[in-house]
Amino acid sequence: MINFTVGPVMASEEILSVGAEQVPYFRTSEFSEIMLENEKYILKYSKAGRNARAVFMTCSSTGSMEAVVMNCFTKEDKLLVINGGSFGERFVRLCEIHEIPYVQIELEHGKKLSKEKLYEYDGQGFTGLLVNVDETSTGVLYDTEMLGAFCEKNHLFFVCDCVSSFLADPFDMDKVKADIMITGSQKVLACPPGISIIVLSEKAVERVNDLKTKSMYFNLQDMLKNQERGQTPFTPAVGILLQIHARLKEIERLGGVEKEVERVALQAEDFREKVKNLPFEFVSESPANAVTPLHPIVGNAYEIVLRLKEEYGIWICPNGGDMKEKIFRVGHIGALSHKDNSILVKAFQDLQNRGLL
C-alpha cells in the first residue's frame, strides 16, 4: 500500500527499524536524556521564544486540545474560535463541554479568513483565540501573522493547533506571539499515532502554573514539572517517543526545519501540477502544504477512496459529515516521493478511462 492520508503516514526505514526494537524501561537517566533532547529539538523547530517549554502527551492531538482548554481557560474567559471545518468544530465542542464562554467565526468550507472578517471582532472583550492553523478537513491554511497581530492588539491568549502544519508550512511561534502550539506524532513527524506535543510560551507556562486544573492525567502543571527531569507523570508511549527522537535527528541531519517544509511544499506542488487536468475542483482558497482536498466533478468522493484502496492498493483520506461524498483529501507528508504522486495520478486516469471519474 502507498499511504497518501494525513496520518498515520509513510515512515522512513530508519524510523520503522526503531519501532521494531524491544521497548526499554523508561525510568532511567538514559531515557530522560532522550526526552530532554526531544524537547530541545521541538522548541528549536517551532521557533519558540525564551523560556518556552514542551511536554509530550500520550494521547491523540484531540487530547492535547482538551488539555489546553482545561489548563489555560476558565469560565471567566471569553474565547474566539475559528471554525472552518471538522477540527475548528472540535474546539467549539471542547469549549461547550468545559463551559468556557466562546464565540465562533464560522467559515464556508475551503474559504480563508479575511482580515476584514476577523476585525469585526476587534475590541469585543475576548480573552483568547483558538485556531487550527491548517484546517485539515478542507486544507485551508490560516494567516498566523494576521491572527497574531490581532491577538497582540486585543491582548488575547493565542492557541495554535499546528497538528498538520508543523514542519509542513512556515511557522515561527515567537514571531507570531503564539502562546500554545500543538502537534502530533503521526503527521510530518511520520511516527505512529499516540503522542501529542504541546509547546508553551513563557506566558503560557505562567498561566498553567497559576491555574488549578481538576484533572490527574491532563494536568499540564504536573507534565511541566516532570519534563524538567525528562520524565512524564505516568507511563508514556515509550516506543513512539524513541521513534520521535530518531525522526527529530533525521530532520536535523537532512537540513532542519526549513528543508523539511521545502520538501513537503515541493511534494504538494508536484501533485497539484500533475492532477490539474483531471476532473477535480480544488477546494481550498489558501492551500496548506500538507494536504490537497479535491472535489470530483463526476463520481462520489467516498467511492473513489474505496476503489483506490481495494483496486490499486492506495490510501487517500476520506472526509466526514456533509463532506463525505463530495471531498476527498490527498496528503503530501511522510516518506512520499514524486514517483508516488505519479502512481496515484495514473490510478486516477485509469478510473477516468473506466468512466468512474
Image (spheres, grey):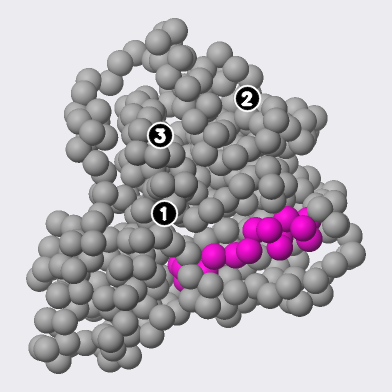
Residue ID for mark 2: 224
Q: CA distance from mark 3 to mark 1?
A: 14 Å
The alpha-carbon separation of the residues under discs 2 and 3 comes to: 25 Å
Query: Considering depth in this image, is 212 or 65 the residue closer to the camera?
Result: 65
- Which label was assigned to residue 262? 1
Quadrant location of residue 1?
Answer: bottom left
Residue 325: x percent and y percent? 35, 81
The answer to whether residue 101 shows anywhere in this view is no
Q: What residue is rendered at 40% in x and 34% in y?
A: 252
Q: Residues within 10 Å of mark 3 (few under 14, many from 20)?
A: some
- The amino acid pointed to by label 3 is Glu
Residue 349, x across and y down, in percent: 16, 82
Q: Quadrant of residue 3?
A: bottom left
- Which residue lies at the image location 53% right of the left edge and 53% below the top edge? 170
Residue farthest top in this picture: 29
In the rendered image, the vertical position of residue 23 relative to residue 98, given as above or below: above
Q: Quadrant of the C terminus?
A: bottom left
Residue 257 on image: x %, y %: 46, 43
The circle on residue 202 is: none
Left or right placement of residue 93 versus residue 268 in this view: right
- Residue 97: quarter of image: bottom right
Residue range highlighted in magenta: 137-151
> Does the image show residue 277?
yes
Real-space Cα separation, disc 1 to disc 2, in angstroms: 32 Å
Disc 3 + disc 1, Cβ < 8 Å = no
Residue kind at label 2, given as amino acid type? Leu
Q: Secondary structure at mark 2?
A: helix
The residue labelled by disc 3 is 252
